Image (cartoon, rainbow, N blue to C red):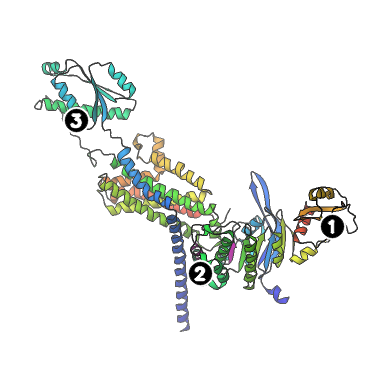
Amino acid sequence: MEKLSSKPAGVIIEGVSKSYTVNKSKLVAVNNISFEVPAGTLFGLIGPDGAGKTTLFRMLTTLLLPDAGNIWVDGLNAVADYKALRKKIGYMPGKFSLYTDLTIQENIHFFASLFETSFEENYDLIKEIYEQIAPFKDRRAGQLSGGMKQKLALCCALIHRPSILFLDEPTTGVDAVSRKEFWEILQKLKTEGITILVSTPYMDEASLCDRVALIQDGKIMQIDTPQHIVDHFDKPLYAVKSPKMLPLLKMLEKDAAVLDIYPFGEVHHMVLKSKDSKVNLPEDATMQVIKPNIEDLFIYLMRNHE
Amino acid sequence: MQLQWMKYLFNWLVKQKEANNMKQFYQFIVKEFYHIFRDRKTLFILLGMPMVQIIIFGFALTNEVKNARIAIVNQSSDKISTKLIQQIDASRYFELYAETKDPKSIEGLFKKGSVKIALVIPPDFETSLSNQNKGSLQIIADASDPNVATTLTNYLSVIVQDFKEELYPNQTMPYSILVDTRMMYNPQLKGAYNFVPGVMAMVLLLVCTMMTALTVVREKELGNMEILLVSPINPIKIILAKAVPYLLLSIINITTILLLSYYILEVPINGSLLLLYAESILFILVSLGLGLLISAATDSQQSAMFISLIVMFLPTVMFSGFIFPIENMPLPLQIVSNIIPAKWFFIIVKSVMIKGGGILLVWKETMVLIVMMSLFFGLAIKKFKIRLA
């Protein structure tokens, strides 16, 4: 414990806010956020589209200036020391931002020289990822599949051996198999001592992080380990099912004992106000106690927030 | 001893750092060339445009009038009038369209647009010429296009004048004043002497200003800029690396224009070729600076294109003196024309290429361009955003 606290924190965010002016009205994208990411951890920023994830990432990567608050990344102030910081961070924007008319190899070599290093120098770090796309190394980046594009973008973000890696929705628009592979890669990068901040709209990816922050409307709703976050869910949760799902949903929404009910795959998840509450179920419906996952908690927090 | 050793190490490290820095810049330029060469269509347009423009201006768009159709009302029908008509028809400026006796019919021809000019020879032409030493002719021109009417009237008058001297070669008049006109630098009054410098300015401006503005803005639009900004590269290097490939392309374009105009349009290069290239490179740098400045101020390719074309290109065509003479403009517009870089380049190219002048003749214009270049590059670097917003 002593050893851990003496390490410099990977990222420290103190009371950071950022707003935009859209059509003459003020839009608060990030609203007074504070949290820390310990060095060497895999930190997830989970939230729906428009929650403020990208704005926060752009402030962390020196691309935007915060309206208020302070940001330290790897011991450097993101505003004052932006030049020094730009040598140390790796960033993969949410939108594919490499050159589509350049081949895989040309892209990697270009980004290596951009950071005044070479492909060979840090090859060991990207070896495993690069080998997966190496058979297509002479193919233009614009002609790659979504999964391969993400791997290439990751190679380019890692080529200068950054101490902190920022990945903005790296798995959006990527197939399930590639997503799984991508997260395996991230776990390995963590063992190299790289601090990783990743944002995602997919709740199932949250359990793969060391710690997660749930973000909604520019505010952090909760920060903890994925397990602790689920433990916060202290209401009874059931899965209900019937041959007529839609009428069931409509009916239970009106039930006084039901706090919340929402479709969840093939079943409805139903939160009761207390353990003793009685629900009037139709005869053909079944209900069963289930363990909450992060998505349940997120929905719960989101509705309470409103 | 140890100090010496450390000094060596330090020097070596500095060199290494510089070498890497150069490599970064070099790689960036290589990348820009990839973009240009892989976009075949655009490259084809960039290199083909000067050729097409030279050919269009050289052969199609010219204000020299050739083979204009003429109607002749010959009420005289004698030997002299027949000879005059033959002479007119033989010249390369006129083509005999109709010969009538009825002066009223020409109005119909003008209205249909069949002829641009008509010559009326009165019935007593030969007799009055031989009896009274005096003959009169009437030229009627369609002045709906005043320039063409003036040009044709002049041509026709010259032909009649020549014809008169042929008839009475030894005629001497008391107190005659002979005006001997010499057209300096362009004795044949070729339009090419004027438009070759103009096309040079136009092509360089299009390629340099518009293409550099587009290439930088494209990186913003596609999100590439987002990663470039997060890297340690100096913005000055991004800007210069963007400019280098277009500088080289433009030098190729100048060469094409000069070769075509020298060999095909027979426009001489009277001054120093080296000076001409040096001045062209200066103008390229001005245009590149302007393009980079536009790219710093815009966020979409569409607006970059709009600004390059409407705000830069049109004033260049209008105020450089290439199509409309600046001397004829009202004073306020003459003052406005001073801020158009192409105006100065146009003067320089005409002085060096056509008049054969040296640097002494164009140093003022050169200084103006140098100041403009420094201003544009300085502003472009200053306005370059080191962040997204």
Check disc 3 and give the amino acid type: Ala
Q: Contact (CB < 8 A) between labels 1 and 3? A: no
Q: Dot 3: within a 10 Å radius of its alpha carbon, few (fewer than 14), some, or many (20 or more) residues?
A: few
Q: Residue furthest bottom?
A: B1
Cα distance between the residues tagged 1 and 3: 107 Å
Query: On the image, numbered disc 1 is attached to which residue?
Result: A287
Residue B79 position within the rendered picture, expressed as x and y whole percent measured from the top left: 13, 21
Residue at mark 2 to residue at mark 1: CA–CA distance: 57 Å
* Chain that bears disc 2: A
B335 in magenta: no
Does A99 lie within the magenta span?
Answer: yes
Q: Amino acid at mark 2?
A: Phe
For the point 11% across and 16% down, the residue is B131
Disc with the residue nearer the chain's start (2 vs 1): 2
Residue for badge 3: B90
Q: Is residue B47 left or right of residue A216?
A: left
User: In this picture, which residue range is highlighted in magenta?
Assistant: A88-108
Q: Quadrant of residue A48?
A: bottom right
* A264 and B263: which is toward the camera: A264
Look at the image and tell me whether residue B334 can be seen: yes
B104 vs A98: above or below: above
Q: Camera-side residue: B227 or B294? A: B227
On screen, B261 above or below A92? above
Q: Mark 2 sits on what residue?
A: A119
Label 2: few (<14), some or many (≥20) within 10 Å?
some
Circles 2 and 1 on the same subunit: yes
**Viewer-closest of B197 and B329:** B197
| Residue drawn at x 88%, y 59% as measured from the top left | A275
User: Which disc is residue A194 wearing?
Assistant: none
Element at label 2: loop
Give the foreground label among 1 and 3.
Answer: 1
